[in-house]
Image (cartoon, rainbow, N blue to C red):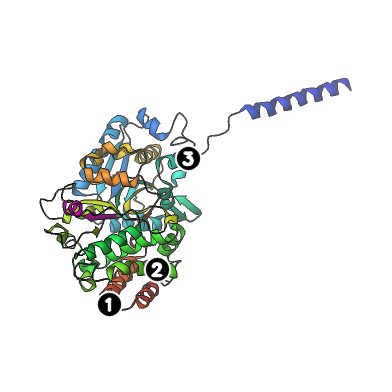
Amino acid sequence: MKSKKSLWLIVGALLVFTIVLSACKPAPAEEGGEAGGAAEGGSYYERALAGEFKGTVVTMTGPFTDEDAVKFNNAIADFEEKTGIDIQYEGSKEFEASISIRVEAGDAPDIVDFPQPGLLGNFVQAGNVVNVLDFLGQDYLQQQYNQSWLDMATMEGPDGPIMAGVWHRFNAKSLVWYPKKAWEAAGYPIPETWDELMALSQQIADDGDTPWCIGIESGAATGWPATDWMEEVMLRTTSLENYDKWVAGELPFSSPEVKKAAETIAEIWFNDAYVYGGRAAIATTFFGDSPTPMFEDPPKCWMHKQGNFITSFFPDGVKAGEDYDFFYLPPIDEQYGKPWLVAGDIMAMFNDRPEVRAVMEFFTKGESIKAWLGTGGALGAQQDVQLDWYGDPIERKIAELVQQATSFRFDGSDLMPGEVGAGSFWKSMTDWVSGSVDLDTALAEIDASWPK
């Protein structure tokens, strides 16, 4: 009995020892972790800087060509030199078509830059895209981006939602341009609310001038500026959830929310005292020419809503900060904050290797676009971007305004199916503006075009 009892005591002691040992053993690292990546010995970015991936190659493709390709390659050159990773970027003007062919052939690049998240969503649904939460922590990403960017990167995969990529550069749309010298001479204020904007429009009209320069003609793409206005007003009059449902086809164009946005626009567009040339001129005026009357002496119109690219259509010789300036398109309903309508580039990962993870993590950092910001032509989506990195004073001021944003959403028509976003939405808005159909008919036509 004694020997048997001793044996059981020994077995018991071994069991206790095993339990204690298991309790002391460190748990496996969670995917993502608090830093950029969960890799042992630091994040994948940190391991890259330590030289662990020296001599590896990461392939990329996207829409950057010509000058943009040069600026992109210059922006990543310092990282390549420090890490020894060769990022081989190949841009294409036929990017949308070529990437589909490459993925279907099993020849996808490691990283793809998508200027249209809707196209990326197709590959996510097919299961082609790596979930960045497999190696980047949610807390880290929330530190680097406004939550809206993360929401826009979350897409439905075959096994549920994934974080489909990380945002790099973007363009801001929610801007109103004005002739600075004449504006200041007239003593006009910068409106902070929609009511103030409407009061200013009436004040300019009462002064015998025309407040707005508006044109939506663009050849085969006629109508797209009207869709931008609709998206801006939707973000200011309803929730982000409703905006997302509208873009996804779950909130019909004929819904009260969308109709209200159109009617809000009509208060400006269909008032002949508010628009240069009146309502009749909107559909026939080339969008690039529409702001030109602002620069006449005296101005023929005083305000023009458009993204930051529009300055390339301004007359030769006019100077930013002297001849023109801009302000944020004011909020309408204060409960929806200060939203920004944007377009931008999301980097998605198709092949999962440590060096590819390191490059993806690099893109989440402001340094990945710092050199580009210095030469102009981009805004940085990352929250660690510094204002003094911007070489263009206009872009620096836009970035300063963007810092006050409460939310971001991508251009809705770019996310909708092609037959809607670049089809019926453009056409029916143009028909409504020109007066050939009423609003209810226009909205019904767009709903009818949505793919079943």
Residue marked by disc 2: 260
Identity, as a three-letter code, of the amino acid under mark 2: Lys
Horizontal side of residue 294 vs 152, given as left or right: left
User: Does the magenta segment cover residue 180?
Assistant: yes
Q: Secondary structure at mark 2?
A: helix
Q: Which residue is mark 3?
A: 139
Height in image: 157 above or below 449?
above
Dot 2 or dot 1, earlier in sequence? 2
Q: Is residue 212 magenta?
A: no
Q: Quadrant of the C terminus?
A: bottom left
Residue 366 sits above or below residue 217 on the image: above
The residue at which mark 1 appears reads as: 435
Which element is circle 3 on? helix
> Is there a contact, CB below 8 Å, between mark 3 and mark 1?
no
Marks 2/1: CA–CA distance: 18 Å
Residue drawn at 89 percent across, 23 percent down = 1
Residue toward you, 388 or 119 = 388
Please, what secondary structure does the residue beneath circle 1 have?
loop
Residue at (47% x, 55% y) in the render: 157
Q: Is residue 381 visible?
A: yes
Q: Residues within 10 Å of mark 2 (few under 14, many from 20)?
A: some
Point out the frontmost of discs 2 and 3.
Answer: 2
Quarter of image, res 216:
bottom left
Q: Position of residue 295 (x, y in %)?
A: 14, 57
Spatial CA span between label 3 and label 1: 51 Å
- Residue at coordinates 46% horizontally, 44% vertically from top-left? 133
> Residue 361 in the image: x percent, y percent?
38, 39
The stretch in magenta equals 175-187
Q: Amino acid at mark 1?
A: Gly
Looking at numbered disc 3 in the image, what kind of residue is underneath it? Asp
